[in-house]
Image (cartoon, helix red, strand yellow):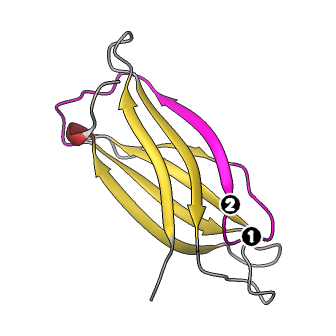
Amino acid sequence: EKLGRLKFQCYFDHEIDGMLRVKVVSAHGIKGSDLSGLSDPYVVVKLHRVNESTAKIKATETVKKTLDPVWNETFEFERVDRGSESYVTFELWDHDMVGDDDLLSQYAVRVREIKAA
């Protein structure tokens, strides 16, 4: 099943130690989840740290009725250890007015693989 593409950027700020910046840019060709054949997508970004039971969570705005949303939203996570086993997940959701939102796709990136800008 084709899930579409999510465009994002992750980088460590070279001027602020431990500052991880995540930019959610856009998505293209995502799955239509509503009866109209479209979706109301948003992205949830989570930083999962080693030895912490809860993730740090950020979310984009919802873009209504599209399969090609554009967000261009940047989030900051502080005090992130670049060499750790922590990871960032991206969850693409469809917002529903009634009932639970639908998870369309997800992706994970290891923090140690993220470069400095």
Indicate yes or no whether the magenta region holds residue 15. no
In the image: residue 83, left or right of residue 77: left
Q: List the residue tagged with mark 2.
A: 69
The magenta span reads 61-85
Up-down: is 25 above or below 21? below
Q: Quadrant of the N terminus?
A: bottom left
Please tell me which residue lies in front, 21 or 55: 21
User: Which type of secondary structure does the marked residue at label 1 adopt?
Assistant: loop
Which quarter of the rendered picture does the C terminus lie within? Answer: top left
- Dot 1 and dot 2 residues touching (CB under 8 Å): yes
- x, y percentage for residue 83? 16, 31
**Marks 1 and 2, how far apart in space?**
6 Å
User: Neighbour class for label 2 at 10 Å: few (<14), some, many (≥20)?
Assistant: many
- Magenta segment: does it hold 84? yes
For label 1, the crowd category at 10 Å Cα-Cα, with few meaning under 14, some 14 to 19 and many 20 or more, is: some
The quadrant in which residue 38 appears is bottom right
- For residue 63, side relative to residue 111 (left or right): right
Q: Position of residue 31 (x, y in %)?
A: 60, 80
Mark 2 residue element = loop
- Residue 55 can be seen in this image: no
Q: Position of residue 54 (x, y in %)?
A: 41, 45
Give the residue at x 74% y 57%.
62
Residue 15's mark? Answer: none
Task: Note whether 63 is above or below 65 in the view shown.
Answer: above
- The residue that disc 1 covers is 66
Q: Amino acid at mark 1?
A: Thr
Closer-to-camera residue (76/36): 36
Task: Give the residue displayed 47% in from the left and 48% down from the top.
Answer: 8
Name which residue lies at 68% across and 75% down.
100
Q: Is residue 113 left or right of residue 52?
A: left
